[in-house]
Image (spheres, rainbow, N blue to C red):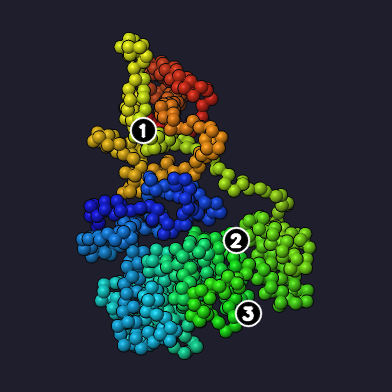
């Protein structure tokens, strides 16, 4: 358990833009920061961070809240895990009491696997650097590959001793001695179980390459055998687990993410040592797909840091054709993809070490080609004059072009490809259309009667949203309280004759904060807040005002994810008023901030109107019930008279409140709101 004073220290040290920028590339947008959503697949950025309020809001997924909320949502951490993550980032020591055996057993699978992975990495590294076998076998191999100590340290490389089949696994025995349970050793893939129930080390006799997530946390391992046995797989990797999802992991991303942002490009290679060698050579914006074919999730992870990618292949023709088949997903995600093919006999490891940083970057700049052009050149040589192969070539090229989401870019690709393939633009467009129909029919699992063109909303077109129902109107009231609670407003006192006027005959006024007036009005009219989170925040305001302090958004939600999420939801907006009205046109639009009194009155009137109409709905329902079954009342006639009297009073209130909005057209009352009692 984390002590409260430590929690407070962590929350006070936390800077939300520092936390979020570990995962999302943020750019200045007025007083906010904006980037691509890390929660959805979007083409136009709608993810906002507001440093002044300590909040984020993702309009594409609806998620929002504080830095703690972000970590809980994005990294799937519990609240204590998120606090520990922040403590590590800001160098705050957490002194927790020793867990009991029951509490230790109750830890989540993810926590247990994460703890085990961190311990295993340290153990593997110790075996490499501090044991005779590790130094002679593992470190000897790495020295032959010319890897420097600093590089091995950056990537936390290790070694697993090569114990015989008849002996207990060295890691298994060490882990059990350290208190790690057998089930976690098996679930993590570090150990396998024999028929007799004993454990052996899955990575025995292998150099270990720890795999980390974007924050640097250890989540899995890759192991390279040093044996010459062809039946032994050269590389093995951790199995899927709640901690490790290979489709979402990129080797080296924790080290390269800042360089990718700086260079505005990611370089993708195939293997662990390729990444290590290029980084050692001074090329830092490089990652590998961790021994798997490139996945959509990996592409989306890279897209958060840059929309440009260079894929570096060796010159093997068979390998090239296999590799380019997976590049369509990169195009589909809207990335600008280039391809560079190494000279024959070279791989990224040897090539980077031979050239060094400057020469390698110059070579990449000169030899990187647009993917579509590269694909045409590669397949055109193979197709030659064979009409069947050329038909397949055209279809393959069009298939790649079809993945590009940008319409203008697709058009340019079609025009250029037509010239290179010796075809008419119209023919390629026709094939593009046929492939689109085929894809839609496959998705619909039925033939399409026609393919009428559909136009999507223009990029950046506003998505109209509104808060509906009683809870929505209470959230609007909360927004005013949070955003303008400390603002001063002036209210005229009620007209009670001469005593309510000054010496000039003008109405007397009183000045106070919006928060004070709002809470006073809620108490005066006896209006109850039904939304539980809104009510918690309002009560917090009441208590704070009694102590002489009016809270702001920065005071809320760090320890309460529900409060943080709602605060971000009502405060962070995707759109701001353009400064051009004043700077370019000399027009100063009237904003809500200029009319706080009117805004407060409007929000309160909407709630009162909602309350009155809800009461009217309940009276009407009771009258109908009474007419159908008088036995439900002890005195039907008397109750009916009372209900009709109340109904007239409610009607007058509704009419009076409606006049405030200069309209008698009212919103439709939702049944679930109408049935609730005040």
Q: Residue at x 63, y 61 (%)?
A: 403
Does residue 367 appear to the left or right of 66 in the view shown?
A: right
Figure check: 279 above or below 508: below
Residue 565 percent across, percent down from the top left: 39, 46
Label 3 Cα neighbours within 10 Å, binned few <14 / some 14-19 / many ≥20? few
The residue tagged 1 is 487
Local secondary structure at mark 1:
loop
Of all residues, the one furthest to the top in this rendering is: 498
Q: How many marks?
A: 3
- Judging by the rendered image, the residue that carries numbered circle 2 is 332
Quarter of the image with the N terminus is bottom left
Report x, y in % for residue 440: 66, 57
Q: Within the image, what quadrant is residue 227 found in?
A: bottom left
User: Which residue is nearer to you in this view: 564 or 202?
Assistant: 564
What is the CA distance from the residue labelled 3 to the residue labelled 2?
24 Å
The residue lying toward the viewer, choosing from 284 and 7, is: 284
Q: Earlier in the sequence, mark 2 or mark 1?
A: 2
* Horizontal side of residue 220 vs 427, given as left or right: left
Residue 317 is tagged as 3
């Amino acid at each position: 358990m984390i002590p409260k004073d430590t929690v407070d220290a962590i929350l006070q040290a936390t800077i939300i833009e520092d936390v979020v920028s570990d995962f999302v590339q943020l750019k200045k947008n007025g007083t906010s920061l904006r980037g691509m959503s890390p929660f959805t697949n979007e083409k136009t950025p709608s993810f906002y961070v507001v440093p002044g309020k300590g909040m984020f809001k993702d309009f594409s997924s609806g998620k929002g809240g504080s830095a703690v909320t972000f970590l809980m949502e994005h990294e799937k951490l519990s609240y204590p895990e998120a606090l520990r993550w922040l403590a590590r980032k800001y160098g705050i020591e957490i002194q927790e009491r020793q867990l009991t055996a029951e509490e230790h057993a109750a830890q989540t699978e993810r926590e247990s696997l994460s703890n085990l992975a961190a311990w295993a990495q340290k153990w593997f590294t110790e075996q490499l650097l501090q044991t005779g076998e590790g130094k002679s076998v593992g470190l000897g191999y790495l020295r032959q590959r010319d890897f420097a100590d600093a590089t091995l340290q950056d990537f936390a490389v290790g070694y697993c001793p090569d114990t015989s089949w008849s002996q207990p696994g060295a890691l298994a025995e060490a882990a059990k001695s350290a208190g790690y349970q057998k089930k976690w050793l098996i679930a993590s893939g570090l150990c396998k179980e024999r028929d007799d129930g004993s454990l052996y080390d899955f990575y025995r006799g292998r150099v270990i390459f720890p795999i980390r997530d974007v924050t640097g946390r250890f989540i899995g391992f890759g192991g390279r055998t040093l044996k010459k046995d062809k039946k032994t797989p050269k590389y093995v990797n951790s199995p899927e687990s709640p901690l490790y999802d290979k489709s979402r992991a990129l080797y080296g991303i924790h080290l390269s993410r800042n360089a990718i942002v700086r260079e505005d490009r990611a370089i993708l290679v195939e293997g662990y040592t390729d990444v290590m060698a290029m980084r050692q050579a001074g090329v830092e914006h490089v990652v590998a797909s961790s021994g798997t074919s490139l996945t959509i999730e990996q592409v989306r992870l890279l897209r958060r840091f840059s929309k440009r990618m260079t894929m570096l292949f060796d010159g093997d023709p068979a390998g090239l054709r296999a590799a380019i088949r997976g590049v369509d997903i990169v195009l589909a995600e809207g990335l600008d993809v280039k391809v560079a093919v190494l000279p024959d006999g070279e791989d990224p490891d040897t090539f980077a070490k031979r050239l060094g940083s400057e020469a390698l970057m110059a070579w990449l700049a000169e030899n990187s080609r647009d993917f579509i052009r590269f694909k045409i050149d590669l397949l055109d040589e193979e197709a030659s004059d064979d009409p069947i192969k050329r038909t397949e070539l055209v279809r393959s090229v069009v298939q790649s072009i079809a993945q590009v989401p940008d319409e203008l870019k697709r058009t340019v690709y079609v025009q250029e490809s037509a010239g290179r393939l010796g075809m008419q633009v119209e023919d390629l467009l026709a094939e593009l259309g046929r492939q689109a129909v085929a894809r839609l029919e496959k998705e619909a699992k039925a033939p399409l009667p026609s393919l009428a063109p559909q136009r999507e909303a223009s990029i950046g077109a506003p998505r109209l949203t509104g808060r509906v129902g009683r809870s929505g109107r209470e959230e609007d009231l909360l927004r005013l309280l949070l955003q303008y609670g400390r603002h001063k407003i002036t209210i005229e006192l009620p007209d009670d004759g001469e005593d309510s006027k000054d010496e000039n005959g003008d109405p007397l006024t009183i000045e106070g904060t919006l928060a004070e007036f709002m809470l006073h009005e809620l108490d005066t009219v006896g209006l109850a807040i039904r939304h539980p989170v809104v009510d918690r925040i309002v009560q917090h305001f009441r208590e704070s005002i009694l102590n002489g302090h009016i809270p702001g958004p920065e005071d809320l939600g760090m320890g309460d994810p529900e409060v943080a999420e709602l605060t971000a939801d009502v405060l962070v907006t995707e759109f701001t008023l353009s400064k051009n009205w004043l700077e370019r046109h000399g027009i100063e639009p009237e904003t809500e901030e200029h009319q706080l009194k009117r805004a407060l009155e409007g929000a309160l009137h909407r709630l009162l109107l909602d309350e009155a109409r809800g009461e009217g709905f309940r009276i009407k329902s009771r009258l109908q019930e009474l007419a159908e079954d008088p036995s439900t009342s002890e005195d039907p006639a008397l109750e009916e008279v009372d209900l009709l009297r109340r109904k007239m009073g409610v009607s007058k209130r509704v009419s009076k409140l409606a006049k405030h909005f200069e309209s008698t057209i009212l919103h439709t009352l939702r049944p679930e709101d109408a049935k609730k009692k005040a």
